[in-house]
């Protein structure tokens, strides 16, 4: 008799599941969709994944993979140009851009073949379908195929992972010119000699530096007064100076008035203050952000609430319908591949095995892969001040990291915001070589309650960039030393050395 309630529950769940063709249907085959499908199948759920284009989504085809491959290629060219200081004299006057872009395409196809092919997921038991998904009701989806045929499927749980697309603002004249977005940038066969980029965020800055290193004339416009507005202002200024040194022209605080085409190329008219000016180039890249793919899903029929920014979800990734979840860019919350994967894990775990998980909003790292890289995790200085949080900022320059010196990468800074006495890390910002790797150390420390004292006491290999992260943590010890205590130690043990100057707030050891 003791087992009867469990048996009744099992019978109820079985009857409920038998009403539907699938246990889980995942809409979208990008980072979030691939992760959601894989985890669902691993839990034993009968799973379908619907993707209208190729699996892999933005990351594989138009985002992370091709952009970082182009960045690497441009970096090789840049380092080759600087090779004389290492005693090597190599000319890079003739760059075969067609071959370079072919290499970018080959890399993304290699990633697709190794990780994203439908066969890989079909071997897991996942049914992969190519078509457009449209809700008919909260449990029913119509799949529209390219040949005009359709198919209706029902599912107990549905995971919306339809991603995002390039957002292009409504600018007079823009629709009359051929412009690029990150969705189309890597489909071109050649790179023009001059390019104007509208948007000084991560995509704009990464591509601006890459094009400049490939010998192109690059101008970047943005309505903001500084680049990379979501990052630390001091560190983004370090990056801006570096990009300007490499030939990128920034026109910040610009209000775009009109875009047109003439015999000389694409003309962008803009205002800075009261002065109207224009910049002309052979090509135009709109790096103005991304917008959630929600318009074609017919979410109204499913009763799923959404806005222009994306689908509304709670911290468990659940939508306004208890059995429908959403993860990744489509929620409008975070537009990072790693957060798409994290949210997919949260969504499927909550839905399918009822283990409570929440989105980790406190420890979201990100990195922009310019040179130097720019990375962030946790709270920024302005946010802490606005909330009235008491904290100390500990700084450490890359010019004091021995590995950075040997590599010639001394341009950069580490900033850590932490509680003065406990050393609890509240946030960290890094501008410099391998910042994307270094920020991961701080993310791990914050997630697991590792204080700056613990961080500083952890042995790191020498010489390494990771050691620089530890030396930045050492500054907590330095700043929290008491001059009075040191005087007592000196007196008790009869030491004869000089006491450091504790009055200097910028002292770095």
Image (cartoon, rainbow, N blue to C red):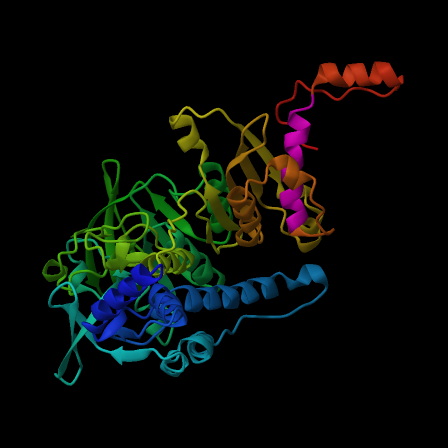
477 magenta-colored: yes
Name the quarter where the C terminus is drawn. top right
> Which image quadrant for residue 30?
bottom left
Residue 366 vs residue 358, the one in the foreground: 358
Residue 341 as seen in the image, left or right of residue 87: left
Frontmost residue, 153 versus 109? 153
Residue 357 on the magenta segment: no
Which residue is drawn at the image coordinates 60% and 66% (left, top)?
A: 80
Picture coordinates of residue 410 (x, y %)?
63, 47
151 on left or right of 68:
left
Instruction: Classify 17 as above or below 483.
Output: below
- Is residue 4 among the parts visible in the rendering? yes
Depth order, front residue of 9/100: 9
Query: Going by the image, does 323 lie left or right of 419?
Result: left
The image shows residue 502 at horizontal and vertical percentages of: 69, 20
Q: Percent from the top left, x then y, of residue 21?
A: 21, 76
| Highlighted magenta segment, given as a residue range | 466-481
Could one spot residue 179 in this view of the protein?
A: no
Residue drawn at 59 percent across, 46 percent down: 411
| Picture coordinates of residue 426, whole percent (x, y) | 49, 35
**Closer to us: 270 or 367:** 367
The residue lying at 69 percent from left, 44 percent from top is 458
């Amino acid at each position: 008799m003791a087992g009867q309630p469990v048996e009744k529950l099992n019978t109820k769940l079985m009857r409920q599941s038998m009403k539907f063709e699938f246990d889980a249907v995942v809409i979208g085959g990008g980072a979030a969709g691939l992760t959601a499908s894989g985890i669902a199948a691993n839990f034993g759920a009968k799973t379908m994944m619907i993707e209208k284009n190729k699996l892999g989504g933005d990351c594989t085809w138009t985002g992370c993979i091709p952009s970082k491959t182009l960045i690497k290629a441009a970096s090789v060219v840049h380092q080759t140009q600087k090779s004389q200081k290492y005693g090597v004299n190599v000319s890079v006057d003739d760059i075969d851009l067609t071959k370079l872009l072919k290499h970018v395409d080959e890399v993304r196809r290699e990633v697709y073949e190794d990780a994203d092919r439908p066969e890989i997921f079909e071997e897991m038991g996942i049914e992969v379908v190519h078509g457009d998904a449209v809700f008919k009701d909260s449990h029913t989806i119509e799949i529209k195929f390219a040949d005009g045929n359709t198919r209706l499927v029902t599912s107990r749980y549905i995971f919306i992972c339809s991603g995002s697309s390039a957002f292009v603002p409504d600018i007079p004249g823009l629709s009359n010119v051929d412009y690029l977005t990150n969705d189309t940038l890597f489909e071109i066969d050649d790179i023009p000699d001059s390019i104007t980029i509208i948007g000084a965020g991560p995509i704009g800055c990464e591509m601006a530096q890459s094009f400049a290193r490939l010998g192109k004339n690059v101008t970047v416009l943005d309505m903001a007064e500084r680049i990379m507005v979501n990052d630390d202002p001091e560190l983004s200024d370090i990056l801006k100076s570096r990009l300007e040194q490499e030939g990128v022209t920034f026109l910040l605080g610009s209000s775009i008035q009109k875009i047109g085409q003439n015999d000389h190329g694409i003309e962008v008219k803009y205002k800075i203050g009261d002065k109207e000016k224009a910049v002309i180039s052979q090509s135009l890249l709109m790096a103005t952000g991304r917008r959630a793919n929600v318009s074609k899903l017919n979410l109204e029929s499913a009763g799923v609430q959404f806005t222009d920014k994306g689908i509304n979800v709670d911290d468990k990734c659940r939508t306004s319908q208890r059995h429908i979840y959403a993860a990744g860019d489509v929620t409008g919350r975070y537009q990072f591949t790693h957060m798409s994967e994290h949210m997919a894990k949260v969504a499927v775990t909550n839905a399918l095995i009822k283990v409570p998980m929440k989105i980790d909003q406190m420890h979201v790292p990100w990195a922009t892969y310019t040179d130097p890289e720019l990375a962030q995790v946790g709270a920024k200085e302005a946010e802490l001040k606005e909330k009235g949080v008491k904290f100390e900022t500990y700084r450490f320059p890359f010019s004091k990291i021995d590995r950075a010196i040997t590599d010639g990468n001394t341009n950069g800074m580490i900033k850590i915001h932490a509680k003065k006495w406990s050393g609890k890390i509240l946030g960290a910002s890094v501008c410099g070589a391998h910042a994307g790797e270094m920020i991961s150390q701080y993310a791990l420390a914050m997630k697991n309650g590792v204080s700056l004292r613990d961080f500083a006491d952890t042995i790191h290999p020498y010489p390494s960039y990771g050691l620089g992260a530890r030396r930045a943590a050492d500054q907590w010890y330095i700043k929290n030393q008491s001059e009075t205590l040191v005087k007592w130690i000196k007196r008790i043990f009869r030491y004869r050395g000089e006491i450091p100057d504790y009055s200097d707030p910028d002292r770095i050891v």
